[in-house]
Every structure is written in C-alpha cells, then in structure tokens.
Amino acid sequence: MAYPTGALQRTFGFTSEEVDALLAYAGMPDKKGIVKAWYDGYHFGGKTEMYCPWDVLQYLVDLQDDPGSKPKAYWNNTSGNAIVRTLLENAHSETRLKIENLIAGKALEERLEEDLTYDQIDKKERSLWSMLYLTGYLTKAKEHPDNGNTALVIPNREVRMIFIDKILSWFEDSLERRDLRPLEDVLWQGDAAAIQKILKQILYGTISYFDNAESYYHGFLTGLLRGAGLNVRSNDEQGLGRPDIIIEDGLHERAIIIELKSASEYKDLDIKAEEGLQIEDCNYAAGLPPQIRRVMKYGIAFWKKEISVKVLASNI
C-alpha cells in the first residue's frame, strides 16, 4: 500500500490532518475514532496533537489484510518497555497509588528533570517520571499548573494497555517470590481474620487497575491460590450454579468453596461477604468427590483494597 507523501512530512509523529489524509487515501475514514483513541494523545507546545506514526501505519497495514482487525498495542512488542518495569519494581505505596490514578485516567503533577541521564533513572522517583515522559509513556495534560510542575497523563489506550500488561507481569513475578504457605494454612483452619489480613497486605503491596469488578478480584484470588500450589477449579458448574472457586484436597478429605462479591461502598463489605455465603442455598458441595468429608465455605467481599471474609465449616 502506498501512502500520500504529504502524510509523511514529520519524522516523529502525524498530525490529526495527516492521519485524516492517510485514512481517506486508504478508504477507511470511518476508523478515525478508533485510531484517535488508541494512538493519538501526544501534545507539543500546548497546542499540537500528534499520533504515534509506527502504530498508525501498523494498524492500517493490518486493516488492509483484514478489514475487521482490532487495534493492538504494537509498541508493546518493542524492546523499550524496561523502563516501566524499573518503575514498578522500585515503586513504594505512594508511587503505586500514582500509577493507579494514571491508569484510571487522572493527571499526575510532577516536576520534570530536563538534564536527566540514564544512570539516574532508578535513583529517585522524579527521574522515573521524567524518563516516562521523555520516552512517550506519559504526555502533557491540557491543564498547566502554576507551581512549576507538569501535569502528566497516559496519552492513549495503547499505552494504558502497556501499563496494565507490565503491571500484571510484575505482579505475577512478585507472587512467585512470595511465601504463600501462611495463606494456605489459615484457609484450611477457617481463620477469617487472618485471611483478611493476609489478602489486604498483598493488595496494598501491589498495583491494581480495577474498577470494583468481581472479575478482577476473581483473577487476583485465583492466581494467589494457584501460586500457593493448591488444586483450584474456577467457575465450574456444580450444584445449582457455578461456584467462583473450589479447592479440593482429596488426601485429607477436605475442600474449600469460595464465593466472591464486590461492594460498591466500604460500609457494604460485611453485607456482601454474608451474601457470598449463598453457597448453602446453591448446594455447591453436592458436586464434590465422594471422599470429601469436610468443607470450608467462604464469602469474600472486596471494596478497592479493603476486604471482608466470612466463613462456615461443615461436615458432609
């Protein structure tokens, strides 16, 4: 596919007008909204908006091959993402909160360092934000603080996906290094207070991008339990429905059934956890292997990084 020469005047980005010309030339003007959401967002001089040229061209090539192609994080396949990993591995609680806010679409005010050298990147937090800005992971927001700081935002959906992808990778690696035996022990003991404390420590010690969705917490807890070496089944049909998580230990003739809930407000945590104990009504234990004699049943509710755990124990 050949592109009009007028659309390739710049070596560092495409303007909105140039992208319009490319899309029109390719016969895909209806893709403008998608391209803008995924690959636009860089600001220069407070006025000019720029698109990432590599991504725009890659997406247009994919569309030529398959008109139904979905946009991708093409930049994620390059080798320059180590800076995100560096930031995450050095993040303390305040930095993690800033990253969560960025992913949620909020602006971050920081004082940038223009004379930054590469060997300074991991020395202090300000250097990391400066490098993320200089490498295109962050861009200037439309607002301009009067205190000498720069308002920074994630420029588009592609970079947001890169942040999320790297966060998940970092989190999974951190789980591999964590001793999860205490969590396994208190689960089998039915110690709701200890479970709540351990899970809360883990949530506050990592980075999350959730929107109070049960699916996030489901993946979070399933990953933890599998990381602890437990035999975990997720969303399998059993009894009168699909229990969220089932853990079986045939050797010791015992099992755990967990139902997860997400609360919309902090004050509803305990109520939601109690609702999670609907396990009794759904007869989930009926589908367990015949050698299972004892079942721990948990209702676990989440609100952001706060947790409520309720437990019932019974013999079958």
Image (tube, grey):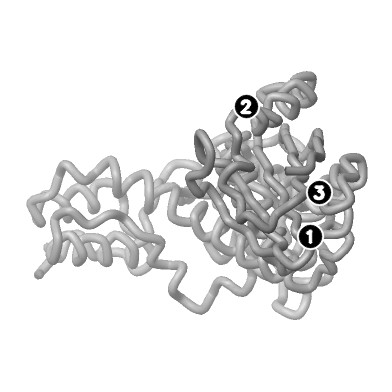
Q: Residue at x 77, y 40 (%)?
A: 305
Q: Secondary structure at mark 3?
A: helix
> Residue 172 lies in what quarter of the image?
bottom right
Q: What amino acid is at disc 1?
A: Ala
> Residue 296 lies in what quarter of the image?
top right
Q: Looking at the image, is mark 2 or mark 1 nearer the viewer?
A: 2
Q: Secondary structure at mark 2?
A: helix
Q: Which residue is mark 1?
A: 91
Q: What amino acid is at disc 2?
A: Asp
Q: Looking at the image, is mark 1 or mark 3 nearer the viewer?
A: 3
> Residue 119 lies in what quarter of the image?
bottom right
Q: Nearer the viewer, residue 43 or 92?
A: 92
Q: Residue at x 87, y 41 (%)?
A: 192
Sequence-first disc among 2 and 1: 1
**Quarter of the image where the N terminus is located:** bottom left
**Could you give the CA–CA distance between mark 2 and mark 1, rounded to whole angstroms?**
44 Å
Instruction: Describe residue 82's horizontal placement relative to residue 38 as left or right.
Output: right
Sequence-first disc among 1 and 3: 1
Q: Residue at x 38, y 66 (%)?
A: 74
Q: What amino acid is at disc 3?
A: Leu
- Is residue 114 at all visible to an observer of this figure? no
Q: Which mark is residue 226?
A: none
| Image coords of residue 174 (percent x, y) | 74, 68
Q: Nearer the viewer, residue 185 or 108?
A: 185
